[in-house]
Image (tube, rainbow, N blue to C red):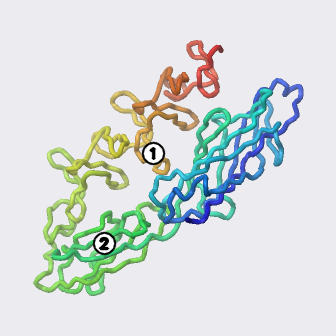
Amino acid sequence: MKKILAILLTAALMVPCFAVTSQAASITEGYINSLSFQIDMSSLAAGSEPSEYDQHNIPVKGVMSDFNWEAGSTSGTGKTGTAYEGCTISITDLQCISTNNSFKVGDTARFKFWVSINGTNKSGKDFKVTSSTAVHVKAATGTTPAVKSVSKTRSGSYELAVTVTSSYLKGQYSEPQNLTWTANSLGQAQWTAPEDGNNAGVYDVRLSRDGRTVYTQSAYQATSINLYPWMTREGDYTFLVRSVTNSSGNGAKNSEWVESDGQEITKDKVSDGSGQGSGGSGGTTSGKVGWQQVNGKWYFFYPDGSMKKNGWEKISNKWYLFDANGMMLTGWQTHNNNTFYLDTSKGDMKTGWVNTSDGQWYWLNPNPQAGTEGAMLKNQFLDKDGYRYYLTSTGAMATGWTKINNEQYYFRPNNDGRPKGSMVTNQRVDGFWLGPDGKWVKGQ
């Protein structure tokens, strides 16, 4: 078990006390404008598992601090040690929600905790959070990793769910293992990923003859490669491999180089160079590398002559999906229980808002740290650029009157100066009043 993750949540732990004057006598409720926290993630380490960081082994200690509040036309700053008739703010159920099997260098971690107001005043002067309540989280002084991003979701009038994403875990990738030449196949090199999983599945490969480099393959995303096309002279050949990063600026350092045993190439076994540029196979080449169009369909070939099949491939910083036969897919596609949209002509995966031929708008997750990149969101609210939207069971953005969890909401059917699909609050629509949380208030 790794060191326990200590977390200091510097927050508004108690609601401010203010004198009730004649001006404030009509105030019926107050609102938190902002909350600030500190989190110490210094024990987060490569090789640990998300399950090691949960509410059972992460002590949560609240520290008294100032915070902002507002009640009607009155506002101010709460002071350390104050209270509002017994109302307090508690922090509960901190857990790690990262989906990694284990953390590695270059990963980020996601934590979630709940901020709840307890003991609310029964006289009606309840102190609440709103959808506009600002939440600020930073790393505790002198600790790493830092906080990369923060999001919040309002769960009723007295609770916020706060999600914190760490910056990248810094360190060095582990070295590849088990470098060997494949038996009975000249120049066919292979290796395995580090046993601890601490790399990105990307490698630099070098071919060396008598100690001198004769060929280099960078950012190679496989664990075998045919190097025979570059064995054009007799000599003792070795290959070297190192783990490298697949994302600039992610805090990961390349591993050290690891070198294989030698393979002797005699004069009668040298390559004629066929396959250079496509990798070849056993000294021959298919003549295909990269994108190739066959009968109007697109396929992608690796330098070793093999074809990408049955899954995703990132090419020129864009994601593409291929079927079991290697054909590039387009349009709406379902993969591993998620729905994606691929450009109908170019095939690259789309993210963010997408307006398709059916006239509907869909939101495709643009942030790989917040879930599966490119996946369609369904059956949930989306807070974006100061507006709230709802994504239905089909993923389409809701418009007009919409029933959600037995409550009625109204979402703008057109752009009226505010975005189409954004939720309407604090006004009447069709004669019905919509409250500050967007719900229809019966009887008003």
Residue 141 falls in image quadrant? bottom right
| Residue 286 screen position, x and y as percent | 14, 62
As drawn, 158 above or below 307: above
Asked if residue 2 lies left or right of residue 141, the reply is: left
Residue 249 in view, yes or no: no
Measure the C-alpha gap from mark 1 to mark 2: 33 Å
Q: Nearer the viewer, residue 334 or 134?
A: 334
User: Which residue is disc 2 drawn over?
Assistant: 191
| Residue at screen point 47% across, 24% down | 399
Is mark 1 in CB contact (under 8 Å) with mark 2? no
Q: Is residue 138 visible?
A: yes
Q: Residues within 10 Å of mark 2 (few under 14, many from 20)?
A: some
Q: Nearer the viewer, residue 346 or 155?
A: 155
Q: Is residue 7 above or below residue 384?
A: below
- Quadrant of residue 356 within the rendered picture: top left
Give the camera-side residue of 335 and 51.
Answer: 51
Q: Is residue 211 left or right of residue 273?
A: right
Residue 211 x %, y %:
30, 86
Instruction: Please tell me whether residue 179 is drawn above or below residue 236 in the rendered image.
Output: above
Q: Residue at x 88, y 34 (%)?
A: 19
Q: Which residue is mark 1?
A: 366
Give the residue type at disc 1: Pro
Residue 89, above or below 22: below
1 or 2: mark nearer the eye: 2
The amino acid at mark 2 is: Trp
Q: Residues within 10 Å of mark 1 (few under 14, many from 20)?
A: some
Residue 248: x and y in percent read: 45, 62
**SS class of the residue under badge 2?**
strand
